[in-house]
Image (spheres, rainbow, N blue to C red):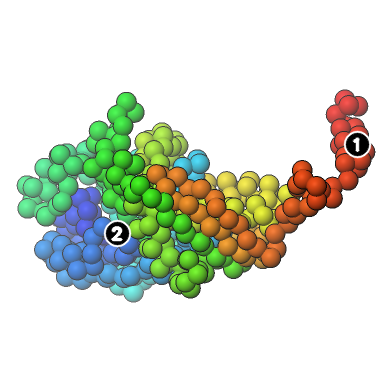
Amino acid sequence: MKKVVLAYSGGLDTSCCVKWLQDKGFEVVCFSANLGSEFSPAEIKRKAKASGIKKIYVQDLQQEFAEDYILPALKANAVYEAKYVLSTALGRPLIAKYLVDIAHKENAEYVAHGCTGKGNDQVRIDTTVKILDPKLKIIAPLREWELTSRESEIAYAKKNKIEISTTKEKIYSIDQNIWGISIEGGMMEDLANAPDEKAYVLTKGIDKTPSKPDYVEIEFEKGIPIKLNNKKMSFLSMIEALNKIAGKHGIGRTDLVEDRTVGIKSREIYEAPAAWVLLQAHRELESAVLDKDTLHFKEIVGLRYSQLAYQGLWFSRLRKSLEAFVDMTQEKVSGSVKLKLYKANIVVAQRKSKHSLYRKELATYGEEDQFNREDAKGFIEIFSLPYRER
């Protein structure tokens, strides 16, 4: 019997995939990566067993995800189209990497996933698999089967007595990990509709947030967050803590009409409380310690970095090369930033770093001003020369 390793989440798509692959004559081995999803490992195993799966790998990859994928993206300030912190996008190459590893371990010729036929995730997983092992064959049931909508998948699941949590009343596609949540589908596919408050998981609506702010102080060492409110903790633990603190203040919601890799525009709703707090803190510290040219060029690098991550090109030479540049820029990104979290806003309260390039005696308009104003005239003459000559 042909063997296939399926990237299994326990959601609607992959639950239907199991049955479909079995009907095609495959022995299905499931692999589930715990990146902080809405399903517990125990629930994943129970669902897989109920579907007739004899072997399933469930691996907690949260620490690896945080340190090897999220942290490099944070250092690069990687945000796609100004609103998406790449939560799902960063997780896909890690899942694909383990999918390949388990296929080798199981001597399987095939790997499979439940990505849609017009989404980004199929590109991300397929591309990563092809980079890591071009000989593996990829099956994507949602590109091949006769089911054309989430409604038809629900009907298929009911017909085949497949346990699912999705209903026609709550038909959103939700992908959750520690860096954020992606929400799409249902009534939100109409741009005339405001996001459904019921779809949110991590964040409170602004009308339900506390009447008093919280202050958080984040300390960095060479671009790596190491302390929260003077307490040393792992990067993963900090993300978990900030998701709770910032989430209760309604921080981290974005609503984006984005450009998918396959060429269409789609509407996505995102939640990422910790991500936006950490990104804001990191940027504020960089603004104090990086020189102008490095800071400005790094913005360009961050934009390209986010595009590569979004497209699933995590293991590309260019992405790795950009990471090397980013790491060089982080040598002086040490210090702390204090932020006020209140009513969906992140307000900078304090920046501190021994490497700060800010000098009050040069910036001030007060009596202690040491800036030589006479130098400005000569500078402007030289600076404007090529433009005047044109």
Q: Nearer the viewer, mark 1 or mark 2?
A: 1
User: What residue is at 67 percent from the left and 60 percent from the top?
Assistant: 329
Q: Looking at the picture, tell me which residue is in the foreground, 12 or 168.
A: 168
Residue 173 placed where, x, y %? 27, 45
Query: Left or right: 357 with respect to 235?
Result: right
Task: Indicate the quadrant where residue 169 lies.
Answer: top left
Up/down of 14 relative to 58, above or below: above
What numbered label is drawn on residue 37?
A: 2
* Mark 2 Cα shell of 10 Å, populated few (<14), some (14-19), many (≥20): some
Residue 338: tell me if it is visible: yes
> Helix, strand, or loop for circle 2?
loop
The kind of residue on which mark 2 rests is Ser
Up/down of 210 relative to 4, above or below: above
* Mark 1 Cα shell of 10 Å, populated few (<14), some (14-19), many (≥20): few
User: What residue is at 69 percent from the left and 55 percent from the top?
Assistant: 290
Earlier sequence position, callout 1 versus callout 2: 2
Residue 102 placed where, x, y %? 34, 70
Marks 1 and 2, how far apart at CA = 59 Å
Task: Indicate the quadrant where residue 84 lies.
Answer: top left
Residue 371 placed where, x, y %? 84, 47
Query: Left or right: 358 with respect to 22?
Result: right
Query: Left or right: 113 with respect to 381?
Result: left
The kind of residue on which mark 1 rests is Lys
Q: Looking at the picture, tell me which residue is in the foreground, 135 or 214.
A: 214
Q: Looking at the picture, tell me which residue is in the foreground, 286 or 137.
A: 286
Query: Left or right: 296 with respect to 229?
Result: right
Residue designated by label 1: 377
User: What residue is at 38 percent from the left and 57 percent from the top?
Assistant: 245
> Helix, strand, or loop for circle 1?
helix
